[in-house]
Image (spheres, rainbow, N blue to C red):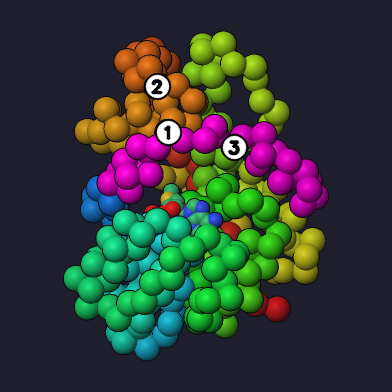
Amino acid sequence: MDASSWDAALDAWRPPAPPESAPAREAALQTALTDDADATGSPSFDRARRALTDGAAVLDVGCGAGRASVALAADAPGAALVGVDPSAALLEAFAARARGASVPVRTVLGSWPEAAARTPSADVVVCHHVLYYAASLVPFARALTDRARRRVVVEIPWEHPHAWMRPLRAALGEPDRPDPPTAPGAARVLRGLGLRVRIQEWTDDADPWCGRAGALARHVGDRLGSTDTDRVRALLDEYGLPPRGRRMATLWWPPP
Ligand SMILES: C[S@@+](CC[C@H](N)C(=O)[O-])C[C@H]1O[C@@H](n2cnc3c(N)ncnc32)[C@H](O)[C@@H]1O
């Protein structure tokens, strides 16, 4: 797969424009999920931790509420953290979490890669669950690489995170979509740029939606362009979705 095919597959899977209420709901949901999450010991955590020395700088692109990086930076004495995100509410939650873990923190409000020019370099750059939201893979990944002194670590689902919603789309009468973009497809594109990208497949057995059926139905409804939350919830029950044991990918590479 080449870069333009990967971007075209990504475009085909882009959700409709969200309702006005969605960003505040998403920020609250991301923060609550991060409160419950324990990312320490995941393959992505380990790949980043191995490249991190005491006093290092960590950059988290699309930091959300800090799931990928606060525990990581807190694990390396003296490490400092910068987070980039277009959501001011999430940057606030991120900074509060870092301060609570006694990690020095800075934030950059904006979207990647546009915000890269205003973002300092770091020893380790992490970017988890953001790549499928990029406008275009290559400029996004190039800017991550440009900002890394030792390693970039990217975590994403093995295939586009909305791929499991296919049966729901069919039930709602939507036409099927082409094959979704995947993590190994992204790795191939990035290797084509000369980057020494490695990839590890693993299974995330955690249930990220535990106890949040209402929030899940609204979140999925936003992705499907449906405001009929009861119908979405009924379909999720009917199809036993989302599937448990998410297939995940950790990609990592050094700067050239
Ligand atoms: C699914 S959340 C993941 C948050 C966090 N990295 C984690 O692993 O929990 C996706 C995050 O990416 C942010 N985001 C989306 N598009 C982005 C972009 N182009 N540049 C930077 N952040 C982006 C969103 O605001 C959101 O905080």
Pick the residue in front: 119 or 244. Answer: 119
Q: Is residue 54 above or below residue 228?
A: below
Q: Disc number at residue 19?
A: 1
N-term-proximal mark, 1 vs 2: 1
Which-is-in-front pick, marks 3 and 1? 1
Check disc 3 and give the amino acid type: Arg
N-term-proximal mark, 3 vs 1: 3
**Residue 252 visible in image:** no
Q: Secondary structure at mark 2?
A: loop
Q: Which residue is mark 3?
A: 14
Which-is-in-front pick, marks 3 and 2? 2
Q: Secondary structure at mark 3?
A: loop
Span colored in magenta: 1-29
| Quadrant of the rendered image containing residue 58 | bottom left
**Which residue is painted at 60% across and 64% down in the image?**
113
Q: Disc number at residue 120?
A: none
Does 20 sit left or right of 173 as displayed? left
